[in-house]
Image: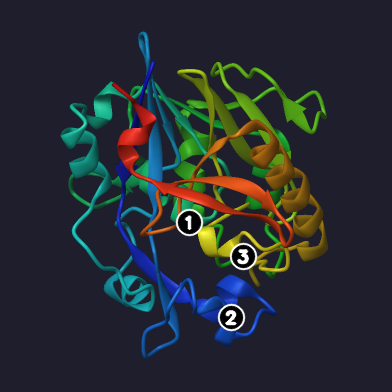
Amino acid sequence: MKLHAIETGNFKLDGGAMFGVVPKALWSRTNPADDKNRIELAARSLLIEDGNRLILIDAGMGNKQDEKFFRHYGLWGNHTLEKSLREAGFYCEDITDVFLTHLHFDHCGGAVRWNKNRTGYELTFPNATYWSNKAHWEWATKPNAREKASFLTENLLPIQESGQLRFVSTSNAHFVSKTELGFGVLFVDGHTEKQMIPHIKHKGKTVVFSADLLPTAGHLPLPYVMGYDVRPLETLKEKHLFLTNAADNQFLLFLQHDAHNPIISVQHTEKGVRLLDSLPIETLNPI
């Protein structure tokens, strides 16, 4: 098995929204804001090369929306999904599976693209099976008012109509040790209903794709919960259990949204679980 970090593009979001009730004087120590109060974020996917399978976890926000939409999110840098895949030695047609942790636009938008003449949409990965879970899919396709702007029809309907959508078997369990894709999944409900957090056994370590349970290293303190979370008190509980387990078992946490700390390890301290080390991408495939 080999793991590849796939940088799909960087963007910015309001720091207050990203840290909820935490004062700016505190969160700006780790995540400084620009003159519009926005912090720098990544949209980092993970590609698992395992035998005949190429599994892409999340796909960034894509490029379907108009200039006004993207201007709001302050895109920066020169990363794209396709470019990063090519740098890893692959093309969109090579991907066998697309695993979507949840269906907010910055996680699944890149999974669907314009067709060649821009008259409609098509799957970015034409040969792939697309994976979600039944409870979250129903949640996303019948959105509540709070999340409606994050669940975009143009990201979801083409997947549904393709015939390439499958649901992970959950058995109503909080943690499934081995899914159809070969890795374990933790199901969490604080950020959105049934977000999936992959746990990948790799070279004697567990690499965890932290998605929006832990967006950045700056979110390690338990009260640092995003304003976007639909159940913030549930996030508090989920983070406590998750970070305790990560520190106890020396997990490597792959941070999807931290533009400057792609992988971290954590440790127990008197103040709770805190950063132990920030690690480079090369940590994924030690020589």
| Residue sitting farthest toward the bottom | 35
- Pick whichever, 226 or 130, lies toward us: 226
Amino acid type of disc 2? Answer: Leu
Q: Is residue 7 above or below residue 284?
A: below
* Numbered tag placed on residue 26 in the rendering: 2
Q: CA distance from mark 2 to mark 3?
A: 30 Å
| Image spot of residue 274 (x, y percent) | 62, 56
Along the polypeptide, which appears first: circle 2 or circle 1? 2
What residue is shown at x 38% (from left), y 31% (from top)? 284
Q: Is residue 234 visible?
A: yes
Vertical placement of 137 versus 260: above or below?
above
Task: Assess disc 1: are there few (<14), some (14-19) or many (≥20) residues with their C-alpha within 10 Å of its C-alpha.
Answer: many
Q: Position of residue 167 (x, y in %)?
A: 63, 27
Judging by the rendered image, the residue that carries numbered circle 1 is 105
Q: Is residue 212 left or right of residue 222?
A: left
The image quadrant of residue 245 is top right
* Amino acid type at image mark 3: Lys
Q: Check residue 148 in the rendering and tell me which mark sits there, or answer none.
A: 3
Residue 128, horizontal then vertical, whole percent: 39, 24
Q: Position of residue 148 (x, y in %)?
A: 62, 65
